[in-house]
Image: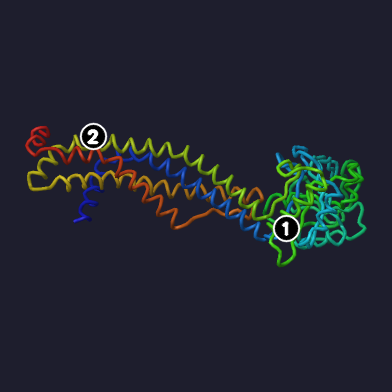
Amino acid sequence: MITDYFKLSLRSIRSRKLRSWLTMIGIFIGVTAVVSLISLGQGLQDSINEEFQKIGTNRIIITPGSGAFGPTGSGLAIGQITEDDLAVVKHIKGIDIAAGVLTKSAKVEFKDEVQYMSIWGFPTDKDGEDLIDGTNFFDIENGRQFKNGDRYKIVLGYNIAEDSFDKKILVGNKMMINDQTFGVVGIQKKAGTGVHDAIIRIPLETARELFDEPEEISTIFAFTQNGFEPEEVVEDIKKALRKHRGVDEGEEDFSVSTASQTIEQLNQVLDIVTIVIVGIAAISIIVGGIGIMNTMYTTVIERTKEIGVIKALGAKNSQIMFLFLVESGMLGLVGGLIGLVLGLGIAKMGEYLAVGLGADIFKIHISVTLILGALMFSFLLGALSGLLPARQASMLQPVEALRKGK
């Protein structure tokens, strides 16, 4: 019996092809937008979470200001941290490694081509080596890492060496930073994160000399020892730095966070952005629902005589209503199916685009929940949109319906 309802609904939709397609446009445009945005947004979250897991949950990051209002070293962060603060952090119980990094923008020249890029000064001592070794994104493909005592040496991210200049940069080439000559000693493996592939590293002491910054630190990276909870160590760091810098709780001019906290904050931001964008895209779905309602009212009027005949043969009001609900639901379902295919296709194109731009880690998120949810939502939206027209059809009296349908 139920299959007959669906067969009749599909037959009705096929008999009015143009109207059916026009009705479904709003649905599949909305579903396309929602599915593609959810797939891309969840895929971005999954990629970020996966990469932070690679970094390790025992990492602690200390930056200047109560919150960063721009990239580290961009000058948009409030306050400043120094070597004295690093010394305080190193003496905190539970800290295994702590190293400071200085980040500045500078003029970079290679083969008479000039660009302005971010330069990262990394320490070359034992803590600096351990920091690099503990971060997978800094692995070397060609050449070597810094040695203790290196001065005017440079290690390049993969994209810097391959794509940033007209000519490919090789180990042994010379580059100039703020008119100072550096020798390229290493090229990093492709990390796929975008940021780490576009990094230029020089020894920290050389960076201090080059930028005339004898004490400033842009970021302190620390790793906790095994057996210590990072969140507890963070609280100890905050207490020690507040005392050292002479600030009260709640008035900190520095920020301390763990990798887990950073993941959580990023996920919250991405969730909010996704919800807002999906909410805007969902407007077209509402418009599509109104279109289905309008079409179903027209269908009821056109099929008034048919309704009268069916009721005269003994059909119940509930059966008539269910017939029209299934038909409106099928309009939503077919539109949703088209939108699902288009949405996943657009999301996949977004993945290819991201990979083409160097973000190899990015993968879209496709799940059974997303697929079934989109289809069920489309059917239910169609059915709800056809609820009033279906009720109107079910309330028609047989004699009146036959009279009006002539």
Q: Quadrant of the C terminus?
A: top left
Q: Is residue 5 visible?
A: yes
Report, in whole angstroms, how far the alpha carbon at label 1 lies from the one at label 2: 68 Å
Q: Residue at x 62, y 58 (%)?
A: 50
Residue 247, image x, y percentages: 78, 42
Q: Are marks 1 and 2 in contact (CB under 8 Å)?
A: no
Give the mark, 1 or 2, whose residue is nearer the N terminus. Answer: 1
Secondary structure under tag 2 reads helix
- Pick the front one: 93 or 135: 93
Mark identifier at residue 298: 2
Between 29 and 269, which is closer to the camera in this rendering?
269
96 left or right of 293 in image: right
Disc 1 residue crowd, few under 14, some 14–19, many 20+, Cα 10 Å: many
Where does residue 249 sit, x and y in percent of width and height?
A: 72, 44
Q: Is residue 140 visible?
A: no
Coloration of the structure image? rainbow
* Disc 1 element: helix
Name the residue beneath numbered marker 1: 233
376 relative to 292, above or below: below
**Left or right of residue 173: residue 371:** left
- When asked about the image quadrant of residue 131, the answer is bottom right
Tell me, for residue 206, which label it has, or none. none
Residue 361 position by quadrant = bottom right
Q: Quadrant of residue 170?
A: bottom right
Place of residue 346 in the rendered image (x, y in percent of width and height, measured from the top left):
50, 47
Q: Residue at x 38, y 51 (%)?
A: 375
Query: Looking at the image, which is closer to me, 117 or 215?
Result: 215
Q: Which of the image's four quarters has the N terminus?
A: bottom left
Q: Amino acid at mark 1?
A: Val
Q: Looking at numbered disc 2 in the image, what kind of residue is underneath it?
A: Thr
Is 291 on the left or on the right of 35, as rendered? Answer: left
